[in-house]
Image (tube, coloured by chain):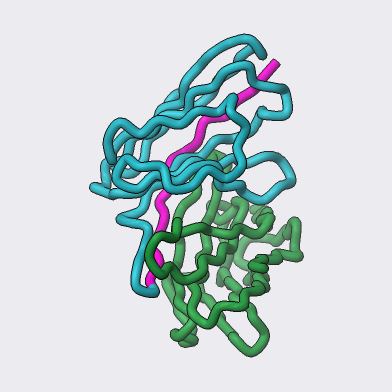
Chain colours: A green, B cyan
Amino acid sequence: AQKVTQAQTEISVVEKEDVTLDCVYETRDTTYYLFWYKQPPSGELVFLIRRNSFDEQNEISGRYSWNFQKSTSSFNFTITASQVVDSAVYFCALSETNYGGATNKLIFGTGTLLAVQP
Amino acid sequence: ETGVTQTPRHLVMGMTNKKSLKCEQHLGHNAMYWYKQSAKKPLELMFVYSLEERVENNSVPSRFSPECPNSSHLFLHLHTLQPEDSALYLCASSQDLGSGGSTDTQYFGPGTRLTVL
């Protein structure tokens, strides 16, 4: 069965610290997609990144970086030099391959609440 | 308006009321979704529509009734709800459902915070 585990329920850091949010997933499929979303207090889930299972290259986007390791089934998210505006709940999600007739389901983790203190 | 919008943003209703949640996407997408987000629980997929056809009903009680009149609009009709239905209801859309080994990114609206008294 598919599962996404975000073991860190809450993390508190001081501004300018680096912080890594962990995501471990389980799937039997060989082709799948992983996502990170940010949910600020306003409620909207903001899409951050999508990665397919064949692309293990790490990605960097400004202060954000992602480390995908199939060997450990992990897709961790690092924020460098955190800022107060980074305070939000971050969700990792997994989607299995669609072979026609499927429904593009996302399996979400329970989220990590990141609080960045000034 | 851009992206995915939802109205109302907040709703308080009694258990005997009937209300509707509205979602509109301005992205030209063909698939739309309803999710329920309760405290301390993962997001739960409720319904999926593709080209106005319902393709997923994830064991949702009949007191929740979705409607998709066109690919840009999605409604969730509510009646005789229970207090445990209080949650954030999120709408999302994607280009399609994905096919041939791909999956399409879902873009979310801001949600409707529902409180059932």
Q: Which residue is pictured at 63% across the width and 78% down the height?
A: A74
Q: Quadrant of residue A103?
A: bottom left
Q: Can residue B1 be seen in this snapshot?
A: no
Q: Which residue is pictured at 70% across the width and 64% down the height?
A: A6
Q: Quadrant of residue B71?
A: top left
Q: Horizontal and vertical percent for residue B24?
A: 33, 35
Q: Can residue B20 be seen in this snapshot?
A: yes
Q: Quadrant of residue B75?
A: top left
- Near-viewer residue (B27 or B52): B52
Q: Horizontal and vertical percent for residue A107?
A: 59, 59
A48 sits left or right of A21 in the view: left
Q: Which residue is pictured at 40% across the width and 51% down the height?
A: B107
- Near-viewer residue (A113 or A118): A113
Q: Horizontal and vertical percent for residue A87?
A: 60, 52
Is residue A41 in the magenta section? no
Is residue B115 in the magenta section? yes
Q: Horizontal and vertical percent for residue B15?
A: 66, 14
In this picture, is B114 found above or below A44?
Answer: above
In this picture, is A82 found above or below A39?
Answer: below
B53 sits left or right of B14 in the view: left
In this picture, is B37 found above or below A108?
Answer: above
- From this viewpoint, which residue is outermost toward the bottom? A71
- From this viewpoint, which residue is outermost toward the left? B28
Task: For the N terminus of chain A, give its image quadrant.
Answer: bottom right
Q: Which residue is pictured at 43% across the width and 41% down the height?
A: B109
Q: Magenta span covers which residues?
A: B102-117
